[in-house]
Image (cartoon, helix red, strand yellow):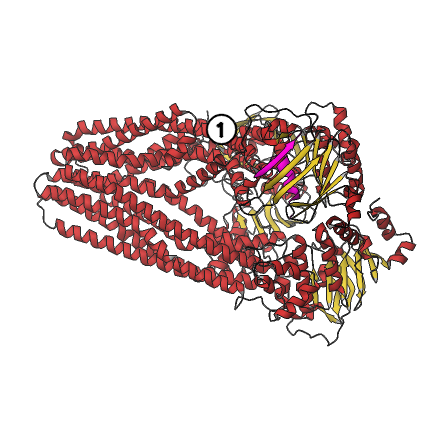
Amino acid sequence: MMIFDVLRLAGDRAAVVRYLVLLVVSAAVRAGAVLTLVPLLGALFSAGPGAAAGWIALLAALVAAGWAADRAVAAAGFAIGFELLSGMEARVVDRLQRIPLGWFTAGRRAEAQRALTSSGRELCQGVAHLLTPVAGALITPPLIGAGLLLVAWPLGLVALAAAPVLLGAMWASGRCLRAADDAYTAASAEAGQRVIELAQAQPALRAAGRTGVRGTAVGRALDRQRSAALRLIGFSLPGQVLFGLATQAALLGLVATAVVLGVTGELGGAQVVALVIVAVRFAEPFATLAELSPAMEALRGTLTRVRSVLDAPVLGADAPAPVVPDPGAPALELRDVRFGHEPGRDVLAGVSFTVERGTTTAIVGPSGAGKSTLLALVARFHEAREGSVLVAGHDVRRYDPAALMGGLGIVFQDVYLFDASLYDNVRLGDPDAPDERVREAASAARLDEVIERLPDGWDTRVGERGAALSGGERQRVSIARALLKDAPLLLLDEATAALDAANERAVVAALESAAGRRATVVVAHRLSTIARADQVVFLEDGRVAEAGAPAELLARGGRFAAYWRQREQAAAWTLA
Amino acid sequence: MASRGYAGAMMKTFGAVEHTLTVAAVDDVTPHYRRITFDAPTLFDGQPIEPASWVRLWVPDPRRPGREHQRGYTLLDPDPETRRVSIEFLIHEPAGPASAWAAQAGTGDTVQVTRWASGHFAPPDPAPDGYLLVGDAASLPGINAILAALPDTAEVRVHLERHQEHDTLIPVTPHPRATVTWQPATGDPAALADAIEERDWSNWYAWVTAESAATKHVRARLKDLGFPRGDAKARAYWIRGQAMGTGRDHTPGEETPTTGTTRNHPATPTAAGAPAGASAGRAGSGGSAAASAGWRSRAGARLLAPLRGRLLLAGAFQAVVSLVQLAPYLLLVELCRRLLTAGPQAEGLAGLGVGALALMGGGAALAGLLVAAMHVLDARFGHRVRADVVGKLARLPLGWFTERSSGRVKQAVQDDAESVHYLVTHAVLDVVAALVAPLAVLVYLFTVSPALAAVLLAPLLAYLVMSARMVQASAAELAGFTVWERRVGAEAVSYVDGLTVVRAYDAGPAGGFRALLGERARFLERWQRPLVRRRTAVDLVTRPLTSLLLIVVAGAPMAAGGLLATADLLPFLLLGATFGSQLLAAAFGLGSVRDALAAARRIGLLLVEPELPEPRLPRPLPGAAGRTVRFEGVGFGYDARRPVLSGVDLEFAPGTVTALVGPSGAGKSTLAALLARFHDVDAGRITVDGVDLRELSQAELHRTVGFVFQDVSLLRASVHDNIALARPNASREEVERVARAAHVHDRIARLPDGYDTVLGERARLSGGEAQRLTIARALLADAPVLVLDEATAFADPESEHLVQRAISELVAGRTVVVIAHRLHTITGADAIVVLDGGRVVQRGTHETLLAAPGLYRDLWQAAAAPLETLT
């Protein structure tokens, strides 16, 4: 039951129990009020208004009690809602911190973003505005049915039997409509995709004179969509008619039962009328449920999103007691590391190499060789399937995550800046560093030129995702941040386009300045970077094809040497 | 407190919040135009003050002591820092209450205002071609505020009626593209309307706030000139000869005492968010339909026009279906009547049952029929709309296809088309059903007992009042909510995208983002918590049980008193408890209709985008091997006032490579785009072998001029079809030949199905591979003139040399124009054209240009791109 799934997200068990108890009380009071109609109307219609006065007073009392109960339910529901509102998104953030990055496909990314932005609000609204009426509408009819058993048991039986039938019809209707919607959306997406492609390929298509709908891929997709839309009728029709028909049939059955009870002489005319009216009230909550079902669908979507994040796998913590870096061990060692984003397709198929302290290793190779993945494994964004990644003598899995991160400087291609001042963004590298060091790091990363140019200097707000800065400027912030952090192992993914040649040289020099103290692993594209490395690891198809000092590899005349020549040719190429 | 009459009571009921303004300064701008600056300590806490927001000012009525009376005034120069705001008053004789109050106001005086149901001016979206503002001195504060809010690029006409000599002294907010005309009042109410010239006002937006009779005339005039209703906002500000005094009365509108009049509308029209659909729904009504055919705001109406009749018919049919579905309940009422009068042994009970069964079956059958019919209608209409979009795409200039416009196409054919689908198949029927059933019940109940039916309206009224008060109380938070949503949304996107870095520096962004989420949650809670009780109360008044209790409590005494037969309670008990909540549900259904109409308008707007003119009689190119391209005095700008290129004269000879060089923004890419007729030139002409590009048929143009740009677009089709895009009949041998030449054949051979591999599903290509595939495509197309963006070579360092070799293959023997990003790659070009600020500043070869001082030499030295070598 979705209701319980939502409530399970709430931490305060006592509040949930209280809410559920109040829900039942409120529904019982409501059922009682409806059942009061039987004697009330019976008296009213057989003996006149005077005779019904007592019952009217009771109805008024029950309606008032129902208000009080509903008010308490609403308060309890909002209490749970507000707890979800303030707590849910923080829980999603916590979980996101520990999920392996490989989990994030484009679709999951979008789901996670939506879970972050609106799950709390949607769940809060869901509990307060949706679960309360839905639960009420679910509980009340059986209670009325049970009450009717005491008044006129055949009618009670019919009512109790009708409830699941109506729910079933509603479910079936919903399924049909959802199936229709899904089919429509799929067909529409397919046709839409074709039209968008068509827009992108206009020049070529115009040259070929193939821009219409007749006989083209687009035309076929549109035709398919038209027939898909017509086929929907098969789903839509029962979806839209079934539930209404079931409600009316149930009502008819209840009324017929009451009338038969009258005809057989068990009940008087006034009593039959009273029961007919109660029967109408009995059917009412189902209409409410049907009205709320689209909103319930939306809530189900929210729930699925939240659950998909909260139930995602997290990077495990292996060691009972986290280890501390071993100052004598190599900065980084990979031992037969195997890893793939999907089973059976390894990106890294047994990689081993060692990075000594204070040295620079360049990872080189064609695109798709697994270079960036390798860095991600060291930072433990993913978990190696086999083999081990050792940082300062210990497997990364044995570190406390914060301690591991504390020992790494990371400059990757996707630069994340948060919407604060430039200063705050650099300062992130070491929140305790004196101003002077922040400035040094900035000037080493050539960020000082940027700061001078900006009217607000250090205080410039970088905007959302650093939008106020260019790609190269963002990269420099990221480098300054890593320099300030001054971690013993620097992981650098060379951004191919973001830095121009002059800046690149300065940055490389800055990174080298700590050579001896710091080990660097750089995914390198530029010949100058590769040439300066102590060691080159040439990756191809997920394996180390060659490794050694650059000059040595070049002399060997193998894969690296061929790669190097191609790069040199490319650099010297002229168009004409 | 002074009495504020009916209007005041209504506002109070609906939760109007009052603010006290204290006069801080009085400034007589002209002898009869006074600007008063107020301290407004509480005004800024409420809903945000937008341009041309206005307030209702409560001023004492000098002629009727003890009464106050309201008038709308525009808020000027709101300053949240100092919490001050100004209002400008026209001082006139004889004076209306507001004018009289302003005339004697001094520092320290106070006045009460409320912003209840007050609007503001929001520029329509999409932006109109121009703004026509019509008014007089009384409405000038509002017009001034609008002028200040309009973008500098908008064309504006201001027509003002001069009623007094001094009127023209009142300053009008300067606007770079505004023309202001003062039209002397002649006593003829049509004078102002006649002053509006006859011209093509298509896609203008009109705002009319003049004297009542003049406004009426202007409104009629605008209708004649083709203004659709949604694009001409007209509201009278004052009424000549009415209210205060006689003779030339300049009392700003509606200053009549407020008792009993329902005309207490805001004095400023609410232009904001005029639902586009409102007018779209009345497509083609009246004689102005033809005149307004070219209006963008009619785009949605035009799109839906073929559906309109059928939707109306379907609505009517649905109304019948709803009534048929209601009928069994009437039979139920009849059944109960008979049971009461004749007891359970009454005659014809079975007959009623059969009747009910028949009606139910009939209702379901009719409903099913209607649903099926609507789906057929929708399938046809949807197909036609998509086909129209596809056809339209083929006629748009290539320059139109930017990333943003691709988004529009996507939106139109997917999301918007789905909204329209929902409109046709569900929304219209749902709304009609939701309205007809409860209204029919209401009418029925009124025929049974008007008094008891009226009692049932009480919860409905209570609901309306309570929710209006709630909305009023949330005005400020509602604005804050939008801001929060945008902010958290953007942060969440960057948070998840930047998760790698977030983890590396956990304390920072994560902490910051978490704090942001917490703050937002607290904001929502601060807002919602006080509303919980109200919300619950609103919920409870519309409960069926509440209505039922009302029926019994009110009905029983009525029956006892003989005001109605006891049996007449039956219809109420059976039908009266739920119609209120049903009616409220209908309001929600209208939301999706509005969305769909907006969607229809977006699709319609796409279909009216200006097209590339096709020559009526295309000229063929003379048969020749190479093509010479000539730019003659070419000028072009995306925006008429900012030319990107001017006075460009160039010639590109067959078999030569010409490189375009210059700083970013110099116009290199634009020049190249003009050559492929992405846009048409504003001045001069571009010819291929002497034939103007505009005289070529599209097919010939694109066969002649090919291009390879940075953004690679591969279709989800086979590799073969992707390469053969421009020549669908090419044989496999030809395709393979060009793939080899583009150095991509080996890669294709390694794909699962070789050339038949469908791209995108199982096979993904790297950036460099995709580029080589497009080069193969260009090789096969074999266009004699080629435009090349050399940045191509940057995408994929590892396969850069292969891309380069493919390019070398491609350029051989053609007329090549290359946009150069790295100077050293074009040192061997036959000609180098240096552009700066949209003009050709230098031309020559690498050697000649380097030999002389100039931009090229500067650029070369700045790049100082030394070849990287292993040292």
The one of B298 and A500 positioned closer to us in this rendering: A500
Q: In the drawing, does residue B270 fall left or right of residue A539?
A: left
In the picture, the quarter occupied by the C terminus of chain A is: bottom right
Task: Residue at the far front: name it.
Answer: A556
At 39% from the left and 49% from the top, the residue drawn is A178
Span shown in magenta: A368-392
In the rendered structure, which amino acid carries the disc numbered 1? Gly
The answer to if A501 sits in the magenta stretch is: no
Q: Quadrant of residue A340?
A: top right
Q: Which residue is mark 1?
A: A87
Measured as percent of width and height from the top left, residue B660 is found at: 79, 57
Instruction: In the rendered view, tell whether residue B601 sits above or below residue A466.
Output: below
At 82% from the left and 45% from the top, the residue drawn is B870
Measured as percent of width and height from the top left, residue A477 is found at: 71, 35
Instruction: In the rendered view, tell whether residue A568 sits above or below residue A467.
Output: below
Q: In the drawing, does residue B71 fall left or right of residue B448?
A: right
Q: In the drawing, does residue B415 fall left or right of residue B798?
A: left
